[in-house]
Image (spheres, grey):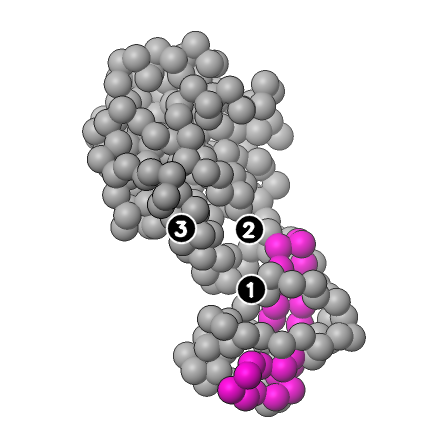
Amino acid sequence: MKPRIYHAGALATGTCITLTGTAAAHVGKSLRLGAGDAISLFNGDGFDYRAQIQQAGRDGILVAIDEQLDPATDASLPVTLLQGICRNQRMDWLIQKSTELGVQRIVPVECERSVARIDARKAERKITHWHSVAISACEQCGRTRLPMIDPPASTDAAFAALPAMATKILLDPAGTQRLDKLLRPGEPVVLLIGPEGGLTANERDAAQAAGFSRVRLGPRVLRTETAPIAALSIIQFLVGDLNDTQD
């Protein structure tokens, strides 16, 4: 597989662009690529761009774009993940893995039992960091569109911003409903996961009032970073693209 590199600027067949910063360092120093080597570029517009390195220097990597491709690797099912903010490494891990599993939007939710707290001064830096985690995941897994990552929001604000027509699922060890009985092909899904300490009774009641169904995945209590990955895998298998096979 050709190395895939994210470039935030415009990409078009027959043009040349210069990779700088971390992208240039990754191509030139980490991958040790040079003139004549092939790479693939993407910028989030839904396409891959086959390209060839023309020149590698201290000021950047000059790349010529040869062809636009549609690899059709993005998930067809729109899934929004409302994730109770958790500690740094756990949050990074679940953003990485949920990106690989095709989540369309991630909303970090400030919950009463969230161990990690993000004040206004740190929010912009955190979002930038999470965005870079998602970019790296897209480079690896072949996605051509980046997931949206919202600023941290309260549960009330997060619930108010949700689409009216969606299957809303709250993972709850005390839930009584089954995931496979709720999902409908083609209908957007909203998945709500609590932080390390779980959601409070008030938060669970507010979620139910906002239209969430309380779903129990099984007899074991999953960690906050494990729960979304398990649920997303099941959802994508039942009504998404993880059960898609090519002849």
Q: Amino acid under label 1?
A: Tyr
The magenta span reads 40-63
Q: Is residue 46 magenta?
A: yes
Mark 2, Cα crowd under 10 Å, few <14 / some 14-19 / many 20+, is: many
Residue plotted at (62% across, 76% down): 18
Q: Is residue 112 above or below residue 122?
A: above
Question: Which residue is at the front of the view, 23 or 93?
Answer: 23
Check contact, mark 1 vs mark 2: CB within 8 A: yes
Residue plotted at (57% across, 44% down): 75
Q: Main secondary structure of the magenta part?
A: strand
Residue 67 makes an appearance in the image: yes
Q: Amino acid under label 2?
A: Leu
Sequence order check, earlier mark of 1 and 2:
1
Percent across and percent down for residue 130 are 41, 50
The residue where tag 1 is placed is 6
The residue where tag 3 is placed is 125
Mark 3, Cα crowd under 10 Å, few <14 / some 14-19 / many 20+, is: few
Mark 1, Cα crowd under 10 Å, few <14 / some 14-19 / many 20+, is: some
Question: Which residue is at the front of the view, 158 or 171?
Answer: 158
Gap in Å between the C-alphas at discs 1 and 2? 10 Å
Q: Is residue 183 above or below residue 10?
A: above
The residue where tag 2 is placed is 146
Percent across and percent down for residue 158 are 46, 25
